[in-house]
Amino acid sequence: MLDLHCHLFPDMDDGPATMDETLSMLYIAKEENIDLIAATHHYMEEQQTVAEYLASWEEKHKQVQEFIKAEDIDLDIVMGAEVLISPFLAQLEGLESLCINGSRYLLVELPMLDIPQYTEDVIYALRLKGITPIIAHPERNHCIIKDPNLLHSLIEMGALGQVNTSSITGLYGRKIRKCARILLGHNMAHLIATDAHSPRTRSPRFKKAVTQLEKWFGSKYSQVLLYENPISVLNDVLFIREPPIKSG
Ligand SMILES: [Fe+2]
């Protein structure tokens, strides 16, 4: 499995606090058949520059790599960030370096409670710059839970959607699980990732979600979501997308 959204490094954000917790997450990830993790920590324009984020990311990466080597864990870690949307995000200096594994794909977070008025403008501006935004866990956004079709126009503009494994398995409740199913079933979400934050409740789990996905959509579409799409992101190639469909 390829986990393109995970808060893995210690003491970077609200993810693991210590290296021990990071190590426990890595062991869980291996048990869950995860071979690659994009370490996508929260990035907020107001709190730090891109250069500052990159410097702390590199430092933590080096430390974690030493443990991975010492413990002989077979798992790759690649660059990433979960970037909170802001009105002038597309103009942010160095933004491209926050993309996943040096690709054109950027994980973008909407606020939990609303979809800001400037969202479409920001997506348009990012697309003009050649960046493809991946909306992180839209199934958890309160407005999208009420009306999943609010995501439709953003996907039509070229954004992608990423659903959390824990939303699929019901960790956040029935409404979010239902919303995840609708988005995936209507080509409004294209990637599955753990968004893990710790070795405890929000841990890097994949297996149960894979079983559920196969029940919902069959193995062929699950393969697209679990392998083909994330591989296209990691290799920075375009993938053929089915047009989004509005839910009934
Ligand atoms: Fe996250």
Image: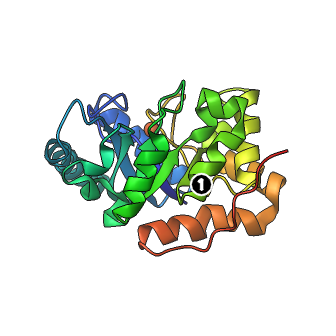
Q: Position of residue 150 (x, y in %)?
A: 65, 40
Residue 76 in which image quadrant: bottom left
Q: Position of residue 156 (x, y in %)?
A: 61, 57
Image point 80% across, 58% down: which residue? 217
**Image quadrant of ligand 1?**
top left
Question: Which of the pair 118/151 is nearer the observer?
Answer: 118
Q: Residue at x 38, y 54 (%)?
A: 125
How many numbered circles are shown? 1
Please identify the quadrant where the C terminus is shown.
top right
Compared to 177, does 68 lie above or below?
below
Per the image, the residue denoted by label 1 is 155
* Amino acid of disc 1: Ile
Label 1: element kind: helix
Q: Is residue 42 above or below residue 59?
A: above
Note whether 157 is above or below 149 in the view shown.
below
* Residue depicted at 64% across the width and 61% down the height: 225
